[in-house]
């Protein structure tokens, strides 16, 4: 369950950039608490205390008991938003949403798979997580840090739907029960490109030039192989 943290806070009256600069010079961070049965109030909290709280948080939902100076009882609240500077990550502002121990709250809780699926270990499948966080409803005391889901029994083609998620006692969800939270897919096999069929080499076509026949007669016949020209015969005589 979400750990409850105590934070000391004081009210602040000044607003605007000059007031914020003074608060930061004092080593504090401007904050605001809203919701519940009281109107929104501007606060300031030690920067060191906020940094310590965030560094020890075990989940995204942090339940805080704000001990505001001048009030006998602390106020229960959820950390709604923490604003950081784009450069350096310095904490600029923090929002708290007041809650009551006897009233239901809504929160997004991370889903975390545990174990190695059988289909991944044995058949090389792929675990796919479709829902990273689950919207839940519960009393503040039942708020979980994370919801862990055992996926070791999943084989290829198996899945876990929202209806089968192991919600802690006192926790419910309005997310549709038939939505798939986890599934194991078959391994992807890349198809090898089909080699083009080798074509038999084709002999180059040889084009021979034709001799044009003389006017009025047929084209002269080519001398037969080994036949000597007429002048050579006369010389031999």
Image (cartoon, rainbow, N blue to C red):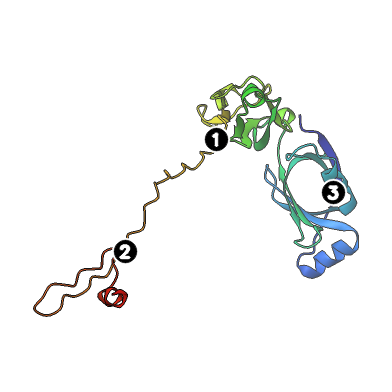
**Numbered tag placed on residue 189 in the rendering:** 1
Question: What is the quadrant of residue 140 in the picture?
Answer: top right
As displayed, is residue 50 above or below residue 2?
Answer: below
Q: Residues within 10 Å of mark 2 (few under 14, many from 20)?
A: few
Can you tell which of label 3 and label 1 is closer to the viewer?
1
Q: Where is residue 179 in the image (x, y as percent from the top left)?
A: 52, 30
Crowd around label 1: few <14 · some 14–19 · many ≥20 (10 Å): few
First along the sequence among labels 2 and 1: 1
Identified at 25% across, 68% down, the residue is 223
Q: Quarter-wise, where is residue 208 in the image?
A: bottom left
Which of label 2 and label 1 is nearer to you? 2
Q: Mark 3 Cα within 10 Å, few/some/many (few <14, many 20+)?
A: some
Question: Which mark, by number, is residue 50?
Answer: 3
- Left or right, 126 with respect to 73, comes to left
Figure check: 140 above or below 96 = above
* Alpha carbon distance from label 3 to label 1: 50 Å
Check residue 37 in the rendering and tell me which mark sits there, or answer none: none
Per the image, label 1 sits on a secondary structure element best described as loop
Q: In which quarter of the image is residue 144?
A: top right
Real-space Cα separation, disc 3 to disc 2, in angstroms: 113 Å
Q: Name the residue under label 2.
A: 226
Query: Element at badge 3?
Result: helix
Between 100 and 187, the one lying in front of the other is 187
- The one nearer the camera, 167 or 137, is 167
Alpha carbon distance from label 2 to label 1? 70 Å
The reply, left or right, for residue 16 in relation to residue 149 is right
Asked if one can make out residue 127 in the rendered structure from this viewpoint, the answer is yes
Q: Residue at x 80, y 64 (%)?
A: 14
Under circle 2, the secondary element is loop
Task: State whether residue 69 appears in this view.
Answer: no
């Amino acid at each position: 369950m979400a750990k409850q943290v105590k934070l000391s806070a004081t009210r602040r009256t000044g607003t605007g950039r000059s007031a914020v600069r003074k608060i930061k010079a004092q080593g504090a961070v401007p904050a605001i608490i809203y919701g519940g049965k009281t109107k929104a109030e501007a606060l300031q909290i030690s920067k060191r205390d906020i940094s310590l709280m965030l560094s020890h948080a075990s989940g995204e939902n942090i339940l805080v008991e704000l001990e505001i100076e001048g009030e006998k009882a602390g106020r229960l609240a959820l950390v709604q938003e923490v604003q950081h500077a784009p450069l350096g990550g310095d904490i600029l502002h923090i929002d708290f949403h007041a809650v009551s121990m006897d009233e239901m709250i809504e929160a997004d809780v991370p889903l975390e798979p545990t174990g190695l699926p059988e289909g991944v270990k044995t058949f090389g499948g792929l675990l796919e997580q479709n829902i990273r966080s689950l919207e839940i409803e519960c009393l503040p005391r039942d708020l979980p840090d994370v919801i862990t889901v055992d996926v070791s029994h999943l084989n290829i083609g198996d899945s876990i739907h929202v209806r089968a998620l192991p919600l802690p006692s006192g926790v419910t969800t309005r997310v549709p029960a038939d939505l798939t939270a986890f599934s194991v897919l078959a391994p992807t096999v890349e198809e090898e490109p089909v080699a083009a069929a080798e074509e038999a080499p084709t002999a180059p076509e040889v084009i021979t030039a034709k001799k044009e026949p003389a006017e009025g007669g047929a084209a002269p016949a080519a001398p037969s192989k080994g036949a000597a020209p007429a002048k050579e015969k006369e010389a031999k005589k």
